[in-house]
Image (cartoon, rainbow, N blue to C red):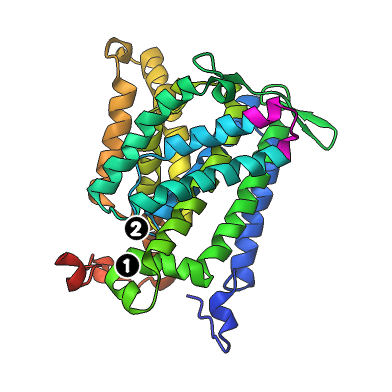
Amino acid sequence: MRVIFKNSYDNDINLFEDRVHLLKYAVLLLAALVMPWVISAYYVGELTSVLIWSLAGLGLMLIAGHTGQVSLGHAAFMAIGAFSHLALMLRGWPFVPALIASGVVTGLAGALIARPLGRMSGIYLAIATLALSIIIEDVAIVATPITGGIAGLFAPPIEFFGLMIDRYGTPRAFYYLCLTVLIIVTLGYANLLRSPTGRSFLAVRDSEVSARALGVNVPRAKTVSFALSCGITGLAGALYAHQAQAVNYESFLVLISITLLLQVVVGGLGSMHGAFFGAFVVVLLPQTISMARSFINTNTPFNLGAYPGMDTAVFALIILLMIIYEPRGIYGIWIRLRTWLELFPLYRKGMFRRTRTYLKTERMR
């Protein structure tokens, strides 16, 4: 077990705890850079999907995991980011300015919506944001000059420093592009949580009553959090549009919002790591189940193809068991395992017994 002796307040706000912590993430980054050269193009595409869903998960994690506001409407903001980005590129904008503009536009839209929705909480906020996902489908059809109507929009090739990047033509280049955007957003996210603004988000999540008593402007904190969350999700929507190559109103249905919420819950609500863990689950688990079904059909006398919807049922069952038996998600499992390894043989099962996380004043509301 490592013991870190802190002799300065800077140790509490450093991005990395020590050199060992920094080395771990350096190795992880190196693995991410090398991976496209040791796997096939198909799996490069799957890893690219993981990166895009991780980015979208970070957007939802900011509002749901670090501000405590439930949202079922982030598919709408992915749509706003995707359509605004493609509309600008088709009008001659370069990729980078169009990507930044799509994030800004989506963030502004989120800020405008957050003002009235900020008065709601819990199930009422979830219903209101769910309505946004439903409304955006009709808006995408009506706003034909921007969204292309029913036909939708086709993503043009990306020209980046003289290099033409295409999802199918140059999958490795597109992977590195998505990885770069994700790294930049992740570093910004981590520094945001260490700032006074990020700490106000956590205070609102833990107890609005206590946050007000400490001088936090709760409506402002919710608005800023919602705007930043939508901006990050808009960036994910823009990259998703290039991955899908063509998007229309059917590309951002309510199921996307539900999947995003499942992603952050299964990955580990309240942790940046949870967005990444959850992305691996929602992208790779269905593929793993499908390959397992094909293997069983080929090598055993059982024919699972006779049972339609088996893949979806198994996927839902795994997620349900995860939520019931490990509410902290995959990140919670990792914390338990790491603590066990660090404290063995002094680890005790009751160390992670769940406690009440809300004040009495919050429960009485």
What residue appears at the point 45 percent right and 48 percent down from the top-left corner? 112
What residue appears at the point 48 percent right and 54 percent down from the top-left corner? 273
Q: In what element is the residue under mark 2? A: loop
- What kind of residue is marked 1? Asp
* Residue linked to disc 2: 68
Q: Nearer the viewer, residue 64 or 137?
A: 137
Q: Nearer the viewer, residue 256 or 326?
A: 256
- Residue 95 colored magenta? yes
Q: Which of the 4 image quadrants contains residue 269?
A: bottom left
Q: Is residue 223 left or right of residue 156?
A: left
Q: Which residues are magenta?
A: 87-96
Upstream in sequence: badge 2 or badge 1: 2
Q: Is residue 36 visible to us here? A: yes
Task: Please determine whether, in this image, residue 210 is positioned above or below residue 309.
Answer: below
Q: Which of the numbered marks, if any, corresponds to residue 206?
A: 1
- What kind of residue is marked 2? Gly
Residue 247, how many percent across, how many down? Answer: 54, 22
